[in-house]
Amino acid sequence: MDLLGSIMNSMDKPPSLSEKEKNIIKKRKEEMDRRQAIEKENLRKFKEYTETKMKVFFENDENINMKFTPMNQIYRSIVHEVAESLDLISFSFGIEDVDRYVRVYRKANPPCEDELLARKRGDPWNDDIKKKMIEKRKLDQLESEELNKKPTKKFVPNTNYEDKYVHLIGEISSIEMARKTETNKTYGFVPSENKKDIRSIEQTMADIKAKKKLRQENESKVQEPKE
């Protein structure tokens, strides 16, 4: 303990603030607290003002939606909070730190998908544009229904094969050949059945040997010298 105490005593202590410096720090803190209090009061007043404004506006049944001027994120969050507390719905549109604003709607009259997309793009939107969009959708739906009602066109080949056969070999033959094509049973004057070899293998081999033997005998007779 004595060693630690001696070390602590030997260390340089931070310089003490003068009265003037203490007064400057105190004034800065007081100024910061004052500004925070002012900002807090401003937010409270803005919330009360926004709530009153919404209530009065939506008491009139003809008023459908309400637009606020562009504001920063903190004030926009208050508008959303107040709208939710009054059973309303709200959306933010525009570019952050440029022209971002809040628009509040009745739950009974929410914005359609076309309106949301238009406002997000920064395009204009009003009742006339809405009517035109509704009419266009109805026309598109009617056209689609008409197309579905049209009967499918039956495929008709460009070439009539029966007519083609008529030009070549006559009407009756063309019909028969179009229905069924058969191999002709005759080739020339000999019926095709006569051209088929119906012998067994053993009979065929025996006939070949007999012919060979007969040929050899004929050759040997030709080669024998005459007396």
Image (cartoon, helix red, strand yellow):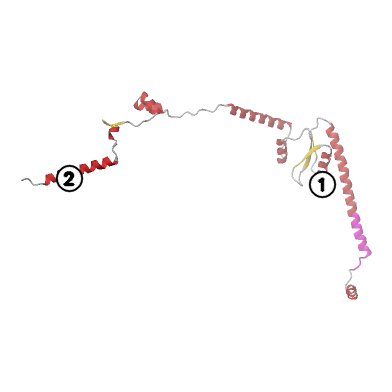
Distance from Cα at disc 2 to Cα at disc 1: 125 Å
By secondary structure, the bulk of the magenta-drawn segment is best described as helix
Q: Which x, y percent locates residue 199?
A: 28, 38
Determine the secondary structure under disc 1.
helix
Q: Which x, y percent locates residue 45?
A: 88, 43
Residue at the location (88% across, 54% down)?
32
Q: Of marks 2 and 1, which one's residue comes earlier in the chain?
A: 1
Q: Which residue is under mark 1?
A: 74
Q: Nearer the viewer, residue 148 or 81?
A: 148
Q: Is residue 112 left or right of residue 224?
A: right
Q: Which residue is under mark 2?
A: 216
Q: Which image quadrant: the N terminus?
A: bottom right
- Whether the magenta-drawn stretch holds residue 192 is answered as no
Q: Amino acid at mark 1?
A: Ile
Q: Residues within 10 Å of mark 2 (few under 14, many from 20)?
A: few
Q: Which x, y percent locates residue 36?
A: 88, 51
- Whether the magenta-drawn stretch holds residue 21 is answered as yes
Determine the secondary structure under disc 2.
helix
Q: Which mark is residue 177?
A: none
Q: Nearer the viewer, residue 225 or 123?
A: 225
> Which quadrant of the structure image shows residue 85?
top right
> Which quadrant of the structure image shows residue 71?
top right
Residue at the location (90% across, 60% down)?
25
Q: Nearer the viewer, mark 2 or mark 1?
A: 2
Q: Is residue 78 left or right of residue 153?
A: right
Q: Which residues are magenta?
A: 15-31
- Which residue ends up furthest to the left in the rendered image? 227
Residue at the location (15% across, 45% down)?
219
Q: Amino acid at mark 2?
A: Gln
What is the count of numbered marks? 2
